[in-house]
Amino acid sequence: MQFIKKTSSRMTILGLIIKSALVLVIILGIVFLLNKIDFPAPKKEIEKIIPNENFKIIK
């Protein structure tokens, strides 16, 4: 029995293109679905007062 080695790179390039297109479609689908979700905006304004004495001047 002899082993036959396929040396055609055409199939590997085609497979790589198909796999990368599939990954791209999945990522775009996830982004699209996350865009559809309506996340609530914060109602309370967040304000933190930082005193000036905590800052150090670095030269």
Image (cartoon, rainbow, N blue to C red):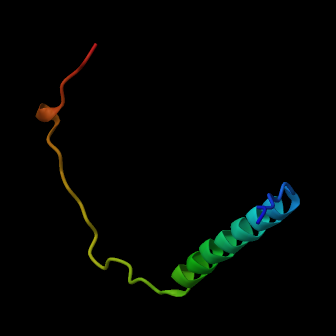
Q: Residue furthest front?
A: 1
Q: Position of residue 13 (x, y in %)?
A: 81, 59
Q: Position of residue 58 (x, y in %)?
A: 25, 18
From this view, report whether residue 3 is shown above or below residue 30: above
Q: 9 and 40: which one is in front?
A: 9
From this view, report whether residue 25 is shown above or below residue 53: below
Report which quarter residue 59 is drawn in.
top left
From this view, report whether residue 10 is shown above or below residue 49: below
Report which quarter residue 27 is drawn in.
bottom right
Report which quarter residue 52 is drawn in.
top left
Q: Is residue 5 left or right of residue 32?
A: right
Q: 5 and 37: which one is in front?
A: 5
Q: Residue at x 68, y 69 (%)?
A: 24
Q: Position of residue 18 (x, y in %)?
A: 76, 70
Numbered disc total:
0
Q: Is residue 27 left or right of residue 10?
A: left
Q: 45 and 30: which one is in front?
A: 30
Q: Residue at x 20, y 55 (%)?
A: 48
Q: Position of residue 39 (x, y in %)?
A: 42, 83
Q: Pick the quarter of the image with the N terminus.
A: bottom right
Q: Is residue 52 left or right of residue 32?
A: left
Q: 35 and 6: which one is in front?
A: 6
